[in-house]
Image (tube, rainbow, N blue to C red):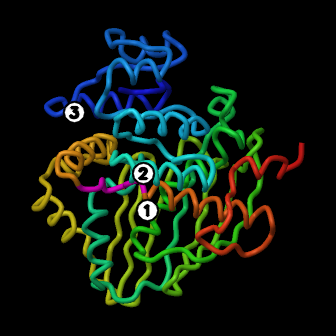
Amino acid sequence: MIIGCGRVASKHLKAISKNSKNCELAALVDVSEEAAKRLSPDAKYFKDYKQAIDEVKPDIVAVTVPSGLHFEIAQYAMEHGANILLEKPMTMSSSQSKEIYEISKKTGKKIAMGHIYRYFPLVDLLRKDLAEGKFGKVTHGSIYVRWGHGDDYYGSAAWRGTWKSDGGALMNQTIHAIDLLVWLMGSNPVEATAMLSQRKANIEAEDLGMAILKMDDGSLASIEGTTCTSDKDKCAMFTVFCENGVASMGLRKGKPSLDIRMSNGKKLNGYYVRKQIKEYGFGSLLSALNPHTAIYTDFIEAIKEGREPIADAKAGYTSVDNLMGIYKSAKTGTVIKLPLDDDFSSMDMTGYFGG
């Protein structure tokens, strides 16, 4: 069952189709019947998500509504017997994300987060080698997400760019990149320092944010997230620097970019591509075209095997907590300790830019 028939729902529909041997679309839920019919004219339709869950009793509920509605739907779905595939961010506050995480543990229902970058080709292989010390000690990491959006994007729905339902460039476009960088670096953030700005977009939240995370092993992670750049040159790049090498990968205009090398200059791109094909098959290289397909494949297998998905409930909770620490640092102008001791939500940023 898919709840929310907006832009990202089409990716879920394609992913379900690609996994048709193991799952099928049970129903669509949206306040707009027109949106649901446009997505899949033959699918069973509900306007009310509670009625849909109670009647259909789906094994998996995909939550693709605006972020401000994630908490109430995820809570109801899990407490009424469904596993959930939850788009990022998990919720709009650190306390609600922790509560969703706790509900998952209490009910025994699994959560797969829409942290798409964890499912890209080579990522898991690289993470394992970094963790095993193949490149030596991690010194620092960096990400930039330059995901340009024009006024048409923010004008397409009233909730976009609002503190209540969406957040800004860091919360919406960058949170799953932050999740990936922390995952690759293999340590936990203990401090956050950040600044936010509004440069182009006429929205409540930031269209440009920069932050530094200090990790518990002493390494540092730099973060840049913006929608100010050209919408015709969208790119996201992740780099982990180590004492004996550097690993960099990302996307630009939908095309993959890869540069993995040892400190002596030896390139390992071919090695990792060959290893990916050997372990996961040639088709796995195409997962970047729609990583939601890989999310569904892994989620279904995780439910059957009784294990956690690659991007699980804990990943959803910790990524929100880290992001809220970044927002809190920007608001207070201070270094913020992580994990947060007290709740902080995107609504606490209301009025940050005035107005």
Q: Nearer the viewer, residue 210 or 164?
A: 164
Q: What span is in magenta?
A: 307-313
Is 215 on the left or on the right of 268, as rendered? right
| Label 3, label 1: how far apart the Cα atoms are | 25 Å
- Pinpoint residue 297: horizontal percent, then vertical percent: 23, 43
| Label 2, label 3: how far apart the Cα atoms are | 19 Å
- Pinpoint residue 126: horizontal percent, then vertical percent: 29, 70
**Residue on which disc 2 sits:** 115
Q: Residue at x 29, y 55 (%)?
A: 308
**Residue on which disc 1 sits:** 180
Element carrying mark 1: helix
Q: Does 1 sit above or below residue 219?
A: above
Element carrying mark 2: loop
- Say which quarter of the image contains residue 290: top left
Q: Residue at x 61, y 38 (%)?
A: 68
Q: Nearer the viewer, residue 74 or 244?
A: 74
Quadrant of the snapshot with the N terminus = top left
> Given the image, on which type of amino acid does mark 3 rest?
Lys
| Label 1, label 2: how far apart the Cα atoms are | 8 Å
> Given the image, on which type of amino acid does mark 2 rest?
His
**Residue on which disc 3 sits:** 18
